[in-house]
Image: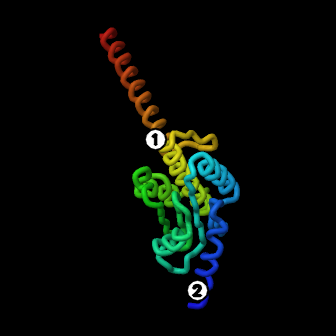
Amino acid sequence: MITRILLLSLFTFLVPLLADKLFIDNEKVVMEKAAVKMEKISDELREKTDYKIYISAKETINGQSITKYSQELAKKLEAPYVLITFASVEEQIELVMSEGLEKILDKDDILDDSIIPLFVEHRKDITKSTQYSAGLFNGLSVISDKLALSKGVVLEHSVGNGTETFMDGLGWIIRILLLATLVAMFIAYRKSQKGA
């Protein structure tokens, strides 16, 4: 009980001091190289639009509700903001945003399409830390791009929405392959007609 009170007191003091930083917490959940790139995107978004994105990436929140934990952190943030909270041991993620941003950002789409798929991918050659970094990086990128677009701003450090870009590219590849298959079938049919 005393530990919780001390931790909450510490957060009450520290969160306002970190108001200009992307990471409220990063307990080695997000890899350093990814964190540096994420900071650049976040800083540019903040400079050009005044929107703030925060990430709390903790190993554990000691069994607390991620929603309640996120809401407590969010109380200390200045609007307009988006807060991504992730606890790796509990494998829980939450996205909280200041009022009005739900008109620009769809929480479920961001979590379900941009972050969670990268968390749950099962590959032996990728560490959990890499997956978490990729998911949070992709989520930050999608959020940043949508917020920038809402203000008519283009971010120089943006990587674009990797999921949408990949799916668009995949769609074109499938179309080209389908067209090539149809052309090959037509040519084979014509040859068979000439030979008959």
| Left or right: where 116 falls relative to 183 | right
**Residue 134 figure quarter:** bottom right
125 lies above or below 14: above
Mark 2 sits on what residue?
Answer: 5
Discs 2/1, front: 2
Q: Residue furthest top?
A: 194
- Tell me the distance, in whole angstroms, between the alpha carbons under discs 2 and 1: 46 Å
Given residues 10 and 160, the one toward you in this image is 10
Residue 109 x %, y %: 41, 53
Badge 2 vs badge 1, beta-carbon distance below 8 Å: no
Residue drawn where x is 53% and y is 59% of the image = 81
The quadrant where residue 61 appears: bottom right
Counting from the top left corner in percent of width and height, residue 45 is at 59, 49
Going by the numbered disc 1, the residue's amino acid type is: Met
Residue 26 visible in the shown view: yes
- The residue carrying mark 1 is 167
